[in-house]
């Protein structure tokens, strides 16, 4: 039996919340990720993501789940 859209969304939200608590993230990384998730302007989203992932150390610290979410945000 497949899960409903609401169930899949709830599971994805829980995954992201858990990834936000990853030990590898610094407090400033968490703040930047939260800011990115609240960005509604498409051009600003591109700028924020470029700035975020241009820092190689930060990108390496960031759980992969965020990269997939961010790619989806850009494609959506």
Image: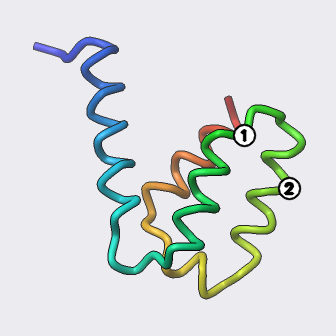
What residue is rendered at 25% in x and 12% in y? 4
Is label 2 or label 1 in front? 1
Query: Along the horizontal axis of the image, is 54 left or right of 31?
Result: right
Sort mark 2 into few (<14), some (14-19) or many (20+) by Cα contacts within 10 Å.
few
Image coordinates of residue 36 in percent, x first then y, are 66, 50
Tell which of 55 and 1 is nearer to you: 55
- Precedes in sequence: disc 2 or disc 1: 1
- For residue 24, above or below residue 33: below
Q: Looking at the picture, does residue 39 appear above or below residue 28?
A: above
Render colour scheme: rainbow
Instruction: Provide the residue designation for mark 2.
Output: 47
Q: Quadrant of residue 23?
A: bottom left
The picture places residue 5, in percent across and down from the top left corner, at: 33, 14
User: In the image, 11: left or right of 35?
Assistant: left
Mark number displayed over residue 28? none
Closer to the camera in the image, 44 or 30: 30
Near-viewer residue (37 or 11): 37
In the rendered image, which residue does mark 1 sit on? 39
Residue that appears at 55% across and 57% down: 67
Marks 2 and 1, Cα distance to the nearest angstrom?
Answer: 10 Å
Element on which disc 1 rests:
loop
Q: Report whether 11 appears left or right of 9.
A: left
As drawn, the residue found furthest toward the left would be: 1
Cβ atoms at labels 2 and 1 below 8 Å apart: no
**In x, y percent, where is residue 16?**
38, 48
Q: Quadrant where the C terminus lies?
A: top right
The kind of secondary structure element at disc 2 is helix
For residue 59, side relative to residue 46 (left or right): left
**Callout 1 environment at 10 Å: few (<14), some (14 to 19), or many (20+)?**
some
Position of the N terminus by quadrant: top left
> Number of labelled discs?
2
**Residue 54 placement (x, y as % from top left):** 76, 76
């Amino acid at each position: 039996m497949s899960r409903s859209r609401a169930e899949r969304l709830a599971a994805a939200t829980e995954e992201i919340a858990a990834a936000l608590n990853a030990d590898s993230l610094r407090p400033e990384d968490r703040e930047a990720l939260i800011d990115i998730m609240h960005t509604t302007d498409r051009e600003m989203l591109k700028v924020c993501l470029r700035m975020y992932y241009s820092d190689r150390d930060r990108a390496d610290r960031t759980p992969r789940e965020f990269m997939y979410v961010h790619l989806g945000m850009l494609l959506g």
